[in-house]
């Protein structure tokens, strides 16, 4: 289930306006990569480019050395899946039917729904703690429940590479940790996620990509990226970085802002 995702001189644009420029990225196969950066820096656009939802303005995205632009759509869907930031579903669809759509890339005219597909759906729902929601409609669920169901859809697809844009959105802290724990259990497939919380990124990621203004500022292990000088460049944030007393991972402590009590 491991696959190597890289980019070569990748540039992405909307209506001719550059959003991501000259990205040279290497997402370690079988590891969990988190992309961090300020709002509007190009993180979501990068994931759209990696998923072939946005064609490159320059450069290419490579999966095990093959340009994804040249892969058949069904082949790519079996190998690479994406959970967007604001997914859309038909009105009235049930949780079971929605998550079942993750199995579509595995279907053929001669191979319809099978016991293996049913098992994959139930396993994905169990992994995200949503099995009891199987027969409920998506419209009935809370924001946090919906987010976990969408993650179950991505898991049911069973791709070699999973791209997730802010998978912890709408979740309280405990459920954020639950989701990130689930993602760790999906290794050694290659996982790339956008997160806003740098401390959670440092705790859970094997590899971090830091972006600013559409450019990749740094990429590497959390201990290499989560450092005061990098946080200052990427987030314009003055901070101290200490060792998390529980995990030993880097922990960002923001400096007090001017005009506020220390």
Image (cartoon, rainbow, N blue to C red):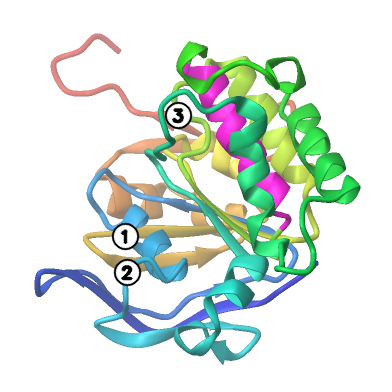
Q: Position of residue 178 (x, y in %)?
A: 69, 26
Indicate the quadrant where residue 129 lies. Answer: top right
Q: Secondary structure at mark 3?
A: loop
Specify whether 206 is left or right of 50: right
Residue at image position (60%, 30%) is 149
Query: For the residues marked 2 and 1, what is the alpha-carbon distance in whole angstroms?
Result: 8 Å
Report the Cα–Cα distance between label 2 and label 3: 23 Å
Which residue corresponds to the image point at 44% horizontal and 36% vertical from the top-left? 89
Q: Earlier in the sequence, mark 2 or mark 1?
A: 1
Check if residue 156 falls in the magenta segment.
yes
**Which of these two is toward me, 103 or 210?**
103
Q: For mark 3, what is the residue?
A: 169
Q: Report the magenta residues as a range.
A: 143-158
Identify the residue shown where x is 35% and y is 59%: 211
**For mark 2, what is the residue?**
54
Please report whichever mark, 1 or 3, sits nearer to the chain's N-terminal start: 1
Above or below, 190 relative to 115: below
Q: Are marks 2 and 1 in contact (CB under 8 Å)?
A: yes
Magenta-span inclusion, residue 117: no
Question: Would you name the residue on which mark 1 appears?
Answer: 45
Residue 108 locus on image (x, y percent): 71, 68
183 relative to 173 in the view: left or right:
right
Q: For the residue carrying disc 2, how many other residues have a C-alpha within 10 Å: few (<14), some (14-19), or many (20+)? A: some
Q: Is residue 145 above or below residue 27?
A: above
């Amino acid at each position: 289930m491991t696959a190597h995702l890289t980019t070569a001189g990748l540039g992405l644009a909307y209506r001719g306006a550059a959003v991501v420029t000259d990205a040279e990225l290497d997402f370690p196969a079988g590891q969990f990569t988190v992309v961090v950066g300020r709002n509007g820096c190009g993180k979501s656009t990068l994931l759209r480019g990696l998923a072939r939802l946005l064609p490159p303005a320059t450069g290419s995205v490579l999966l095990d050395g093959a340009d994804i632009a040249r892969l058949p759509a069904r082949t790519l869907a079996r190998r690479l899946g994406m959970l967007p930031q604001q997914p859309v579903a038909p009105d009235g669809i049930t949780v079971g039917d929605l998550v079942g759509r993750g199995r579509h890339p595995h279907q053929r005219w001669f191979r319809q729904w099978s016991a293996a597909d049913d098992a994959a759906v139930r396993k994905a729902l169990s992994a995200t703690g949503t099995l009891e929601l199987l027969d409920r409609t998506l419209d009935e669920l809370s924001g946090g429940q919906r987010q976990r169901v969408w993650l179950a859809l991505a898991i049911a697809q069973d791709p070699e590479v999973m791209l997730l844009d802010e998978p912890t959105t709408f979740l309280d802290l405990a459920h954020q940790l639950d989701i990130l724990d689930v993602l760790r259990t999906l290794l050694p497939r290659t996982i790339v996620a956008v997160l806003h919380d740098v401390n959670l990124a440092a705790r859970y990621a094997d590899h971090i990509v830091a972006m600013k203004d559409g450019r990749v500022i740094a990429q590497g292990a959390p201990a290499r990226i989560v450092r005061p000088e990098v946080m200052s460049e990427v987030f314009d944030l003055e901070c101290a970085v200490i060792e998390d007393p529980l995990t030993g991972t880097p922990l960002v402590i923001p400096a007090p802002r001017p005009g506020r009590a220390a």
